[in-house]
Image (cartoon, rainbow, N blue to C red):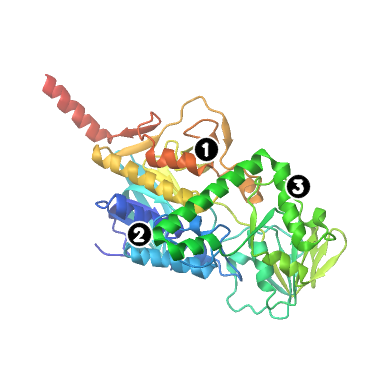
């Protein structure tokens, strides 16, 4: 069969994306479904997804690597809060160590997938080097993340074309950018801005973080002293498992306490920042958000680097709104003008489901905003299809691992009982809720394309690793909601055979 032609290639499982989730999915398929064939289609030329795409200064994890790393492959570096190149190296090592790379087809952009109940197959159409290619698969698992890799979010700021300096979005960082001695403005207050500001103070004359409103920040040591101590004195896998469990418990307890006692949590978080910036700093204006902790994701500040940069005068925070860009910089609503040589718009992401893949089921176009998420993994009325969407209150990979293992359970169940499809079916009585209970702008902008959840399991997103661990790894597959079937022709043939036997 010729590679790179329009001839269909058939696999048991087709995975979209070769990032952190896609490589993990390949591992679990090889471990739990060793007799099933699979292929991973990756739009870009390299493994790593987010960690290969983003190349801006200081790029790092916003979760500790003991939980952002895989359950099956210990994180061996000293730093728990790791930089982008280290994470990219880790994902590539995993792909090579477990034989995943040979299953990856690079430069394959998945465009659409069509399910036929009669054939009990997905037909997946992709583009490879400008040419159409097709694959068929019994099951499709999307590991393409939740945002548009081609274009980040950029508000329509007035007068942007007037600015005579360099304007950059972090998602498309120029390799040859020299910011030595330059005045830099970073627009935004999320994880990207909080990473960029201290990282660029090594060369820039000054870096200003311009925010419309503050975000909650929490500082943690880049290295976990206890984890490193245990790794020197225990078997590697045991030390990793203990540290991973400790980190999971801390994340979950902290989240629950923040939601239960928001005022106490707020006071504690702001108090820690005040200790770094001193009693005279204007905390109310620049570091006191309008919302409660964990209504949006917290920004991680490793080793207090952001606060040290401010304290040393290398960076500053301005809280205001933009009236217009000017030739020299930005004019604010207050009348102040900030001058800059470089302006970085760390203004967020554009969300999309399944890497933009269009789905049809028996000729019916699937609209993502009309779907309901089943166990956070599958979707109402869509057979043999799942996607990875990690936690908003903990590390992405914790849930990715569980979803991949669950998908393997479903695939094996279909095989063992000679069934062809598994389809979640939503009952008529339900109360709708947003898919993600977060007030972050990028989620609010995407409400129309995000699936929904309800108030009752299995259509409820618990954002709880403990609950999902029991449900996805050990819960019953036959729950009356996930409907297992044989393809119509096979089912009809078996019915005729039974009737003939009884005649």
Q: Residue at x 63, y 77 (%)?
A: 177
Assign a secondary structure to mark 3. Answer: loop
State yes or no: discs 1 and 2 in contact (Cβ < 8 Å): no
Question: Would you name the residue on which mark 3 appears?
Answer: 290
Which mark is on residue 45?
none
Q: Is residue 417 left or right of residue 146?
A: left
Measuring from the top left, give residue 172's x and y in whole percent.
59, 68
Q: Quadrant of the C terminus?
A: top left
Closer to us: mark 1 or mark 2? 1
The residue identified by callout 1 is 370
Q: Residue at x 53, y 60 (%)?
A: 226
Q: Secondary structure at mark 1?
A: helix
Mark pair 3, 2: CA separation: 49 Å
- List the single residue furthest toward the front: 233
- Of 183 and 391, nearer the camera is 391
Question: Which residue bears the numbered disc 2?
Answer: 133
Q: Quadrant of the N terminus?
A: bottom left
Disc 2 packing (10 Å; few <14; some 14–19; many ≥20): many
Distance between the Cα atoms at labels 1 and 2? 29 Å
CA gap between label 3 and label 1 equals 31 Å
């Amino acid at each position: 069969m010729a590679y790179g032609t329009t001839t269909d290639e058939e696999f048991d499982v087709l995975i979209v994306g070769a990032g952190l989730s896609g490589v993990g999915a390949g591992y679990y398929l090889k471990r739990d479904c060793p007799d099933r064939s699979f292929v991973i289609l990756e739009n870009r030329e390299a493994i790593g997804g987010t960690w290969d795409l983003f190349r801006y200064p200081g790029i790092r994890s916003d979760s500790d690597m003991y939980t952002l790393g895989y359950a099956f492959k210990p994180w061996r570096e000293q730093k728990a809060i790791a930089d982008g190149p280290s994470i990219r190296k880790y994902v590539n090592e995993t792909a090579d160590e477990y034989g995943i790379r040979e299953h990856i087809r690079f430069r394959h952009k998945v465009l659409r997938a069509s399910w036929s109940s009669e054939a009990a197959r997905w037909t997946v159409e992709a583009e490879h080097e400008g040419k159409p290619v097709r694959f068929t698969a019994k099951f499709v698992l999307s590991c393409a993340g939740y945002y548009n890799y081609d274009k980040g979010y950029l508000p329509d700021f007035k007068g942007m074309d007037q600015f005579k300096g360099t304007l950059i979005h972090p998602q498309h960082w120029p390799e040859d950018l020299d910011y030595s001695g330059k005045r830099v403005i970073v627009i935004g207050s999320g994880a990207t801005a909080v990473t960029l500001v201290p990282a660029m103070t090594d060369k820039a004359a000054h870096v200003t973080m311009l925010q419309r409103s503050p975000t909650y920040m929490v500082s943690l040591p880049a290295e976990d002293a206890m984890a490193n101590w245990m790794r020197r004195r225990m078997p590697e896998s045991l030390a990793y498992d203990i540290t991973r469990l400790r980190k999971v418990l801390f994340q979950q307890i902290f989240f629950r306490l923040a939601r239960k006692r928001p005022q106490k949590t707020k006071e504690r978080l702001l108090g820690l920042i005040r200790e770094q910036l001193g009693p005279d700093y204007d905390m109310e204006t620049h570091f006191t958000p309008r919302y409660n902790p964990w209504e949006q994701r917290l920004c991680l500040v490793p080793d207090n680097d952001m606060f040290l940069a401010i304290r040393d005068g290398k960076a500053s925070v301005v809280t205001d709104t933009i009236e217009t860009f000017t030739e020299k910089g930005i004019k604010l609503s207050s009348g102040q003008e900030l001058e800059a040589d470089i302006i970085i718009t760390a203004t967020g992401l554009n969300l999309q489901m399944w890497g933009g893949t269009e789905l049809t089921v028996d000729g019916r176009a699937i609209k993502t905003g009309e779907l309901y998420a089943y166990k956070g993994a599958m979707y109402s009325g869509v057979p043999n299809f799942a996607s990875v969407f990690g936690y908003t209150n903990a590390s992405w990979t914790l849930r990715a691992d569980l979803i991949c293992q669950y998908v393997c359970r479903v695939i094996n169940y279909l095989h063992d009982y000679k069934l062809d499809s598994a389809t979640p079916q939503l009952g008529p009585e339900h109360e709708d809720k947003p898919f993600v209970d977060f007030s972050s702008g990028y989620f609010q902008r995407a409400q129309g394309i995000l699936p929904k959840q309800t108030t009752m399991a299995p259509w409820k997103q618990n954002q709880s690793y403990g609950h999902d661990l029991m449900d996805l790894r050990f819960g019953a597959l036959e729950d009356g909601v996930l409907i297992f079937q044989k393809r119509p022709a096979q089912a009809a043939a078996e019915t005729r055979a039974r009737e003939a036997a009884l005649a």
